[in-house]
Amino acid sequence: MWKTLSPWLKDFMGLFLPRRCSACDMGLMPFEESLCLACLEDLPLTRFHHDPANPVERLFWGKLQLTSASAFLFFRRKGMVQQILHRLKYKNDRAVGLELGRLMALELMASDRFNTVEVALPVPLHKGKERQRGFNQSRVLIEGMQREWAIESPIGLLVRAKATNSQTRKGRWERWTNVKEAFTITDPEALRNKHVLLIDDVVTTGATLEGCVHALARIPGIRISIFTAACA
């Protein structure tokens, strides 16, 4: 919405609704969106997407058959990326999610390893969790990506069929057993012979993404890639 306002209206609204950077909380200039120029310059980029042996891809070696996998940013405890994702997920800061998604798209569009992707799917939340939060943060990232990249993202194809407990304090085996049967595909034919990109906010052990890939991998001819906003 902010982009569509005239410069004088932005200045007027800024007197009453000062906008702040979602990473450092400093005031934003009229030409800045969600993140100030200093924080944009300091984003901890991984540059993994040009490397087929990057740490995210290696996380799934021997477990999944993927076309490619990568993450946009490094996640560090109490760092800038944690602040950004916390605001997106828990403070309803969709604007920074859209901006982050836009930047993610620019990175992938320049990578030969991802340029055949046809469909982007968010890692789904259970309906109850999404209703409680009001949105799916991974869907917001895709909407941001679509501002730069003409990529399909059908709603409701990959769904979380059962609610699962929080993954935060679980070990790898517990995380995997928590989500291994949690996902289902509502229309497999829509993804037959497609290159599908799974989008999530953070990859840690990769258990949730594994659950999604196992559900998708039953579809004939499908190719699956993974891209997350950050890797921990």
Image (cartoon, grey):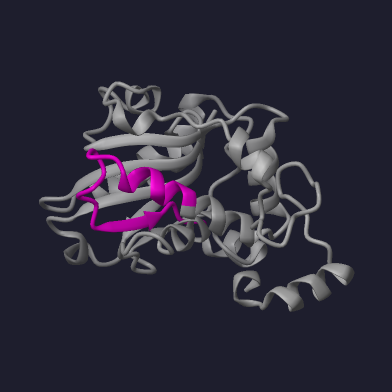
Magenta segment: 103-125
Name which residue lies at 72% across and 62% down: 30
The image position of residue 94, as x and y in percent, is 62, 61
Left or right: where 121 falls relative to 222: right
Residue 182 in sight: no
**Left or right of 173, for residue 85:** right
Image height of 21 relative to 16, above or below:
above
Q: Residue at x 17, y 56 (%)?
A: 194
Q: Is residue 173 above or below residue 24?
A: above
Image position of 77 with respect to 193: above or below: above
Q: Quadrant of residue 167?
A: top right
Figure quadrant of the C terminus? top right
Rendered location of residue 97, percent (x, y): 58, 55
Q: Give coordinates of residue 19: x percent, y percent.
A: 78, 60
The N terminus - image quarter: bottom right
Answer whether residue 92 is visible to the viewer in this image: yes
Q: Residue furthest front?
A: 8
Residue 58 picture quarter: top left
Q: Find out whether residue 121 is within the magenta segment.
A: yes
Q: Is residue 87 magenta?
A: no
Among all residues in the image, which is located at the extreme right? 16
Number of numbered discs overlaid on the protein picture: 0
